[in-house]
Image (spheres, helix red, strand yellow):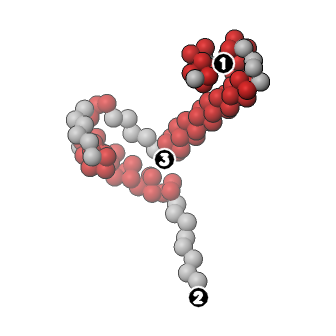
Amino acid sequence: MEERKQAANRNYKDSVFVDLFSEDTAAKENFLSLYNALHNTHLDNVSALTPLRLEQGKSLGLAEGKSLGSRQAKLETARLMLQRNYSTAEICLMTGLTEVEVETMCN
């Protein structure tokens, strides 16, 4: 028989994780220690940490993805315009890219 895996309830896991670290009196220090272990870093400024919930992380990732996609679309449009001999000024106007970015594509 085929075994079906149940989908993880990420909201629950996120909540448990946050609860574990937010109730502890040394929560930020514990979180920093965990972060350093996971990322092989040696950060020591606990006050610089900002805890994020899973949904916040998803939102940040989605915004970053949209930004990268928008940039890729601008570059593709500029590339097509260059192939059709549009001027640098016209390409900058239509795409929002700088002259340096467009001229870099020419080289």
Query: Disc 1 versus disc 3: distance between alpha carbons?
Result: 33 Å
Furthest residue toward bottom: 1
- Residue contact at pointers 1 and 3, CB within 8 angstroms: no
Amino acid type, mark 3: Leu
Tally of marks: 3
Image coordinates for residue 63, horizontal then vertical, percent: 58, 35
Q: Residue drawn 72% across and 14% down? A: 87
Image coordinates for residue 34, horizontal then vertical, percent: 28, 49
Callout 3 secondary element: helix
State whether residue 58 is above or below residue 97: below
Q: Residue drawn 41% across and 55% down? A: 16
State whether residue 10 is above or below residue 94: below
Q: Residue drawn 58% across and 23% down? A: 107
Q: 102 or 46, which lies in front?
A: 102
Quarter location, residue 41: top left
Q: Residue drawn 73% across and 26% down? A: 83
Query: What label does residue 54 carry, if any?
Result: 3
Which is more foreground, mark 1 or mark 2? 1
Disc 3 residue crowd, few under 14, some 14–19, many 20+, Cα 10 Å: some
Amino acid type, mark 1: Gly
Quarter location, residue 1: bottom right
Could one spot residue 10 in this view of the protein?
yes
Query: What label does residue 1 carry, if any?
Result: 2
Which residue has dot 1 on it? 96
Q: Earlier in the sequence, mark 1 or mark 2?
A: 2
Which is more foreground, mark 1 or mark 3? 1
Q: Earlier in the sequence, mark 1 or mark 3?
A: 3
Furthest residue toward top: 89
Image coordinates for residue 7, horizontal then vertical, percent: 55, 66
Image coordinates for residue 23, horizontal then vertical, percent: 32, 47
Query: Disc 3 versus disc 2: distance between alpha carbons?
Result: 34 Å
